[in-house]
């Protein structure tokens, strides 16, 4: 017997029930399958990169910017990534916020030193045995006074840290203004210095004149011994005096120093009548004193000089203990020189028609080093006093 057909609504509900049952069965089977499968491995991570990233964010980063790796020069790992960051750190560490000069240590002491001259900051302050003065000698004291600089303000005074004319390579030794040539800026200063004669003016170590004189001393040291260091140079001042016409040369002369003139900025001539050095600087050379030290002369009674500084050094000696010696650089009017190679101790003047004797070194001659001999006092003037290591 055939079943009676279901009404349309009942048929629809039956179909929905069948579909729901199938869906629940499928979900249950899927869950059981998932439980049966082994757990999946987590995604792979590049651990070396992670370690590198953690390191890069730490000790290997620049100590200033903390953004770039520290600079490695192939031997050493520096604290900074480059010059810019290094300069920033130096500027921050320097007193007053100013970076130290390139090539200088950030911990280097300032140039100013309590023991150095308050003006030039190069030479030690002068001590007269009782008092330590503010300056190394008269030159710096005069220049400080002329420029209005006193005490520790010295050369760095109101010029904003730049070099003052007095401490420059061409400053006038009297007033400090720039000099076009020589030691003085004008005829007025030269005349004033001459009026104060006899006197010594110290030449600053950075001056063109200091370089010229010290270079001549070093270049003309011809003995096998090492050339000593030049410590100070002074310009001698003398009253004007007529001199013979002729070519002028710079020659060395060594003599006896009884005092400590020139040491530690001491520019005051002593009062001893037997101090040869101060006597020459006070009144120039005197033929009346010929032979007083050596007792003779290869070319007679004259005033002896040499172009060889080491030869004149042999005649330079101290009476008082000192670790420095003194030598004079002179301007000598040669005129027409007469060349000689053998001794003639009886001479009192050059041969007729000549103004001086040029003693030359030749094979078989009597000299090891040259000499220039003049026979008139007006032909020679001491120009510079040079102090050097004994």
Image (spheres, rainbow, N blue to C red):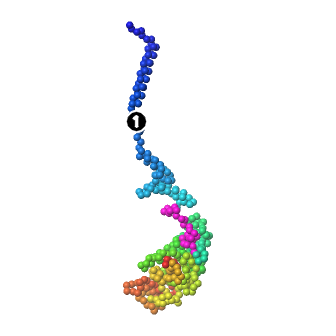
| Percent coordinates x, y for residue 147 in the rendering | 60, 70
| Percent coordinates x, y for residue 371 in the rendering | 45, 84
Q: Residue at x 42, y 25 (%)?
A: 28
**Above/below status of 386 relative to 76:** below
Q: Residue at x 49, y 75 (%)?
A: 230
- Observer able to see residue 126: yes
For residue 85: magenta?
no
Q: Is 295 positioned to the left or the right of 199 in the image? A: left
Q: Residue at x 54, y 58 (%)?
A: 93
- Quarter of the image where the N terminus is located: top left
Q: Residue at x 52, y 76 (%)?
A: 233
Q: Could you tell me what secondary structure mostly forms the magenta stretch?
A: loop
- Label 1: element kind: loop
Q: Residue furthest bottom?
A: 346
Q: Residue furthest top?
A: 1
Q: Is 118 positioned to the left or the right of 228 in the image? A: right
| Percent coordinates x, y for residue 375 in the rendering | 49, 88
| Percent coordinates x, y for residue 98 in the rendering | 55, 60
Say which residue label 1 marks.
40
Closer to us: 124 or 147: 124
Q: In the image, which residues are magenta?
A: 101-126
Closer to us: 350 or 258: 258
Q: Is 201 positioned to the left or the right of 363 in the image? A: right
**Above/below status of 160 relative to 127:** above
- Observer able to see residue 277: no
């Amino acid at each position: 017997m055939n079943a009676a057909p279901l009404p349309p609504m009942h048929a629809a509900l039956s179909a929905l029930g069948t579909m729901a049952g199938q869906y629940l069965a499928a979900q249950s089977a899927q869950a059981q399958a998932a439980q049966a499968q082994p757990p999946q491995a987590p995604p792979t991570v590049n651990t070396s990169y992670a370690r590198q990233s953690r390191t890069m964010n730490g000790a290997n980063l620049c100590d200033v910017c903390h953004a770039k790796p520290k600079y490695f020069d192939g031997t050493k790992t520096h604290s900074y990534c480059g010059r810019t960051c290094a300069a920033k750190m130096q500027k921050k560490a320097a007193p007053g916020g100013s970076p130290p000069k390139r090539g200088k240590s950030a911990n280097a002491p300032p140039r100013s030193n309590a023991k150095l001259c308050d003006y030039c900051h190069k030479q030690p302050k002068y001590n007269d045995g009782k008092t330590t003065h503010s300056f190394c000698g008269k030159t710096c004291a005069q220049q400080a006074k002329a420029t209005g600089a006193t005490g520790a303000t010295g050369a760095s005074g109101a010029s904003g840290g730049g070099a003052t004319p007095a401490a420059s390579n061409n400053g006038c030794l009297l007033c400090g203004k720039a000099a076009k040539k020589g030691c003085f800026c004008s005829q007025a200063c030269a005349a004033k210095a001459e009026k104060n004669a006899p006197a010594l003016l110290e030449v600053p170590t950075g001056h063109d004149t200091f370089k010229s004189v010290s270079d001549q001393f070093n270049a003309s040291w011809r003995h096998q011994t090492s050339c000593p260091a030049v410590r100070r140079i002074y310009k001698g001042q003398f009253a004007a005096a007529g001199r013979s016409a002729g070519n002028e040369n710079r020659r060395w002369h060594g003599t006896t120093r009884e005092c400590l003139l020139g040491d530690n900025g001491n520019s005051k001539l002593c009062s001893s009548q037997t101090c040869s050095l101060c006597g020459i600087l006070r009144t120039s050379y005197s033929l009346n004193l010929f032979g007083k030290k050596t007792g003779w002369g290869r070319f007679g009674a004259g005033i002896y000089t040499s172009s060889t500084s080491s030869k004149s050094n042999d005649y330079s000696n101290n009476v008082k203990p000192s670790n420095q010696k003194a030598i004079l650089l002179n301007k000598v009017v040669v005129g027409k020189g007469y060349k000689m190679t053998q001794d003639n101790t009886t001479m009192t003047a050059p041969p007729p028609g000549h103004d001086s004797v040029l003693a030359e070194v030749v094979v078989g001659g009597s000299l090891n080093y040259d000499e220039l001999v003049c026979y008139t006092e007006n032909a020679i003037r001491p120009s510079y006093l040079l102090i050097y290591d004994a």
